[in-house]
Amino acid sequence: MSSMKSYLRLLPIFATLWAGPLPAQDRQFGDILYDPPQGWDEGREKDGVKIFLSDLPGDRCEFCYVFLSTSQPDTGTLGRFLIDNLTLFEDPEDRDDFEALGAADAIEMAGRPALMRGYRFDGRKLYILIAVDLGDRKTLLGFRGSFSDEDELREISDTFSGEIIPFFDGLTFVGGTDDQLLPVATAGEMSGVWWGWRQVVGIGLDGMTRIDIDHEILVFYPDGHVYRGTPPGGVDTIDRNSMMDAFDPDFGIYTQNGRRRIDITYADGRREELTWNRSERAWSDGTIDYREVTPVADGTPLDGGLYDFNYTGFTPGSGIEGGIASSSETTFRPDGTFTGDSFGSVSGNFDGGGFTFSDGDAQSGTYVIENGLLIMTDRRGETSAEIIFDTGDGILIGDQFLDTE
C-alpha cells in the first residue's frame, strides 16, 4: 500500500519537531519514568513489556497498542538491536509476518539517539518500532494499529504522530537506585500478613453469570516496606535492593498518617490509601477489609489437598454444543511430599462434525514451609512458592483453601 509508505515518510519530521512541555512523571516501569498516556488504559505487564490499549473517545484508534520494554545490555548498533528484537511484542514464530516499509530513520527520542522503522504486520496492521540507545543498554518502544481501509490507516498514523511520539519523547530513562521514584522507607508500626477478599462477578462464554472470590494480601515489614501478594523472600524480612533490581511493581513503602490511615506507594508509582475500620477491626481500601492473619509456622507438616474445577459452555447461538473444562488437584502428605494432577479439555459438536482436544500433566515432589511460604520442589528440580497462613477459618495457600477432609 503506497499510502502507508507516504504516511511513514512524515513520521521522522513529527519526531524532530515535537517540543512540548513535559508533565510530572509519577509512574515507573523498569528504568523508564513516564506520565500515563491520556485516553489509554492503565496498562498491563507481561514478560518485561508494558502494554497500553487505546481507550480514546469515539473508538478512535480502537485496536491500537503502545509498548514499553525493559532495557537490555547491548553495545552493538541500533539497527542490529532492532532486527534482533523485531518480534519482542509478538510471537517469535511470526517474524515472517513483518514487512519493512522503507528504510529506518535515525532520530532523537527523549534526548537519546534512536532508530525508527515502520512495518506492515500480518497484512492489516501497522507497526512502528523505535530502538533507543541508552549507552551500554538499549530499549525498544513500539506502536501497533489495525486498519481495514485508508481512512483507518490515516487515523492510526495521526494518533501516532500527534499523541504517541510526544508520549515517547517525554519518557525519562534512569539508572541506579538514586533515580527510582520510590522514596526511602521510614520504620513504622505495621508488621505481619493482612488478608481480605471480595466477590468478582463475570459472564462466561456460555452467557451464564460467574462468581469468583478474589483474595488480596498485604505483607507489612517494620522497616516501612510493604509487599502485595506473595513476597519472594518471605514474610519476615525483605531486601529492597533485590526488589528494585528486579523492579517488582508489587513492592513498596507505607507511611502511617496518625492511627487510622496508611498511605502506600509502589515501585511503579501506584498509590493506595487504607483507613482503619473500627467496627470491622480491619484496614479498608473502600472495597476490601484487610485483617491480620497468622503465617503457618516453619516446618509444619500438611495433610490435605487443593482442588479446583472450572467449566464453561460455548456462546449460545454459536451452533456449537460443548465447552471448556479444566481441573487440578494437589495432595500434601505429612512426610513432606506432594503429588498433583492437572487436566484440560475442549470439546464441541456441530452440524456435520465435532472435535475434542485434551491434555494432562502429573507432578510430584517435596515441600517445606519456611518464612511464611510453602516452597514446592518438583521431581525436575523446579521450585515454586506460595504464601501460606491461617485465616481463622482454614489454611489459605495462595488463593486456595487447604481441604483437610
Image (spheres, helix red, strand yellow):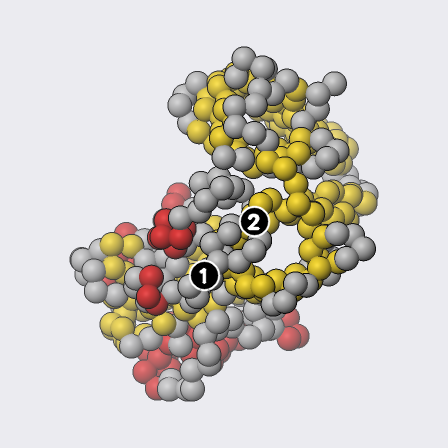
At 30% from the left edge and 62% from the top edge, which residue is drawn? 176
Helix, strand or loop under label 1: loop
- Where residue 94 appears, x then y in whole percent? 41, 47
Image-quadrant location for residue 204: top right
Cα separation between marks 2 and 1 = 14 Å
- Where residue 88 appears, x then y in whole percent? 38, 52
Q: Quadrant of the N terminus?
A: bottom left
At 40% from the left edge and 23% from the top edge, which residue is drawn? 381
Q: Is 62 on the left-hand or right-hand side of 206?
A: left
Q: Quadrant of the C terminus?
A: top right
Residue highlighted by disc 1: 185
Instruction: Please tell me which residue lies in front, 257 or 369.
Output: 257
Please tell me whether residue 193 is drawn above or below residue 105 in the rendered image: above
Residue highlighted by disc 2: 191
Helix, strand or loop under label 2: loop
Q: Amino acid at mark 1?
A: Ala
Q: Is 302 on the left-hand or right-hand side of 94?
A: right
Q: Amino acid at mark 2?
A: Ser
Categorize mark 1 by other alpha carbons within 10 Å: few (<14), some (14-19), many (20+): some
Q: Residue most toward the top?
A: 335
